[in-house]
Structure formats: structure tokens, C-alpha cells
Image: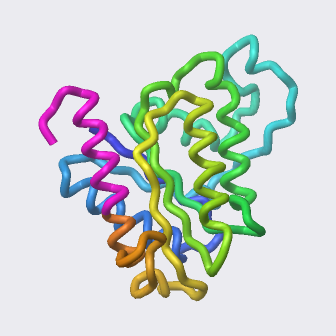
Amino acid sequence: MKIIGLVCSPRQGGNTQILMEEALAAAREAGAQTELIFVPDLDIAPCDACGSCEESGRCKNNDDMDIITQSLEDADGMIFGTPVYFINVTAQAKTVIDRTYAYIRTGKLKGKVAAALIAARQIGAGQVLSLLYTFFAVHRMIIAGGGIGYGREIGEVRTGPGGAPGFTALQEARSVGRNVAAMIKKFKGESA
């Protein structure tokens, strides 16, 4: 069982990455092999709406998005992490979302387990979760929920609240990692 963690925050070592590392640690404890991809380190061009992927099932751009697509194809599940930027995902996250358009026709993401991790200062986490759930649903992925961590400055999610009453940000992140691993096991017919 392999789970990919995509960190789409431009701040390396920031709150999104802290949450993702916690989620992936919980997934490893549940028996998963994990891979963390820090998206801003990659050179990924935005979709140019050329339409070539509708014929070929692959994007014509040869760039670092190939690293992500290969990892996603090889994985059983993914955790998609982004901070809230103007009540939306980051530019890095949106670029990844748009570049997966080629998969709509091929169905290469269908049946993979997906969850979201959102780092937020105060507002917008619900809207971003909704957007990511829609992204997962369009690809017919199995949605394993999501988690929210509140904090503005780097590291504040370590002691900050989560989105659910009574949960810390780190508790939510760990729950996301466990949920993705458990859902993959369930669909593979393994005992959780």
C-alpha cells in the first residue's frame, strides 16, 4: 500500500508540510509506504488548454508534473495538502489540479483513495475542503475525508486547533493518515 502526500504550499517547512508529515507518519504506522512531494520544488507549467490530452490521455508538456503523475499512478492513495489563499487553494495546488485533466478520460485516478489537509489562518478551510472533494469526485476517487489545522505563523499548527470540536490540528492530520490507510486496506480486502 502506497500513499503520496502532495504539499502545495510555497513555504517549505510551513504548516501544511507539518500537517502532512504528521499524516504520513500515521499512515506508515498503519502499514503504508509513503512519499512526500513538495510541489513548489518542481517546475510545472500551467495547463494551456491545448486539448491534446483529450486525444492522447497524456499532457503534451514534458516537465516535472510527470513526477507527480507517475507517483499518483503507482500509489493506492493520496493526501492533498494546501494552505488557504484568498479562500482558495494555492497557485501550486491549482496547477496540479488542472494538469490532472488528462486523467478524466483515462480514469487513471478512479478508485484511488484521497483526502485533503488544509492549513488555515482563520477562514476559508471549509470552502477549500469542498473544492478538493469536488476535484476528487470528478476523478471518481474514494474520498476519505480531510483535516484542518489552524495557525498563521510557521509551527503554530503544532499547538493549534483542528477543524472539529475538541481536536487539535495534529490529531486531525493523524486521523487523515489513518483513514486513508484504512480505506485502502478495506478496498483491497485486507484487515484494518
Q: Which of 80 and 148 is in front in this view?
A: 148
Residue at left 65%, top 49%? 131
Residue 37 higher or lower than 118, as above or below: above
Residue at left 62%, top 80%? 121
184 left or right, relative to 16? left
110 left or right, relative to 102? left
State the residue lying farthest toward the front.
165
Q: Position of residue 95 (x, y in %)?
A: 72, 47
Q: Quadrant for residue 114, please give it.
A: top left
Residue 19 higher or lower than 188, as above or below: below
Magenta-drawn stretch contains 190? yes
28 left or right, relative to 160? left
Magenta range = 175-192
Q: How is the image coloured?
A: rainbow
Majority SS type along the magenta span:
helix
Q: Position of residue 5 (x, y in %)?
A: 45, 53
Q: Position of residue 24 (x, y in %)?
A: 34, 58
Residue at left 57%, top 45%? 133
Say if residue 41 shows up in the picture: no
Residue at left 68%, top 25%? 102
Picture quarter with the C terminus = top left
